[in-house]
Amino acid sequence: MKTTLKGITIKPLKRHYDERGSFTELIRKDWKTLLHQDRLVQANFSTTYPNTIRAWHRHLRGQTDYFIVLQGTLKICAYDEETQELNEVISTGENPQITKIPGHYWHGFKTIGDKSAHLLYFTTKLYNHQNPDEERRPWNDPTLKPKTINGKEDHPQAGKPWDWDHPPHK
């Protein structure tokens, strides 16, 4: 998938199968087209129940997040407040990929489908419990109105408050 927001990158991951099962490399420091100069310093794992939304937040001190869905399906969104562009990425455990999100974008996700999503994510900054690098806004903030979604001005949700529950379209 091609993204329109600068710095957001999707890297498909290759599963190698044999009679024992499968093996997948999740991250390598020599993947320079993905990491550039980033140095990953923390790994986190979260489980999110079906139809749950975890949004919106951003990091203003230079953190970048790298998301890998291990199970289930997530709709991952990133929003640039300056340009009013939104990127929407569907990521599944069945078709693994890394979604890189520079932290200055508002971002979040929703679990799609009837099973929990397992998310492994890496960060470029350590979490500071006393002074977290997180700015938040409500998941249903009516002021978050993308002008374009995945580069399309004619998207059914363009120009309207973002609706995580909007039905899929063709």
Image: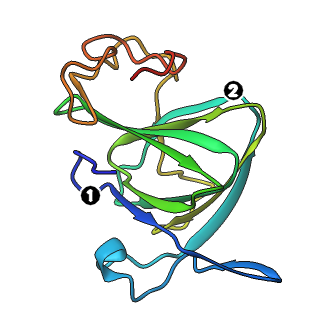
Could you say which is closer to the camera, residue 136 or residue 105?
Answer: 105
Q: Residues within 10 Å of mark 2 (few under 14, many from 20)?
A: some
Left or right: residue 8 compared with residue 63: left
Q: CA distance from mark 1 to mark 2?
A: 28 Å
Q: Residues within 10 Å of mark 1 (few under 14, many from 20)?
A: some
Give the answer, above or below, for where 53 lies relative to 34.
Answer: above
Residue at the disc numbered 1: 7
Which quadrant, please, contains the C terminus? top left
Q: Earlier in the sequence, mark 1 or mark 2?
A: 1
Give the answer, above or below, for where 119 lies relative to 16.
Answer: above
Mark 1 vs 2: CB contact within 8 A: no
Secondary structure of residue under mark 1: loop
Residue occupying the far bottom of the picture:
30
The residue lying at 77 percent from left, 41 percent from top is: 116
Secondary structure of residue under mark 2: loop
Q: Amino acid at mark 2?
A: Asn
Tell me, for residue 51, which label it has, or none. 2
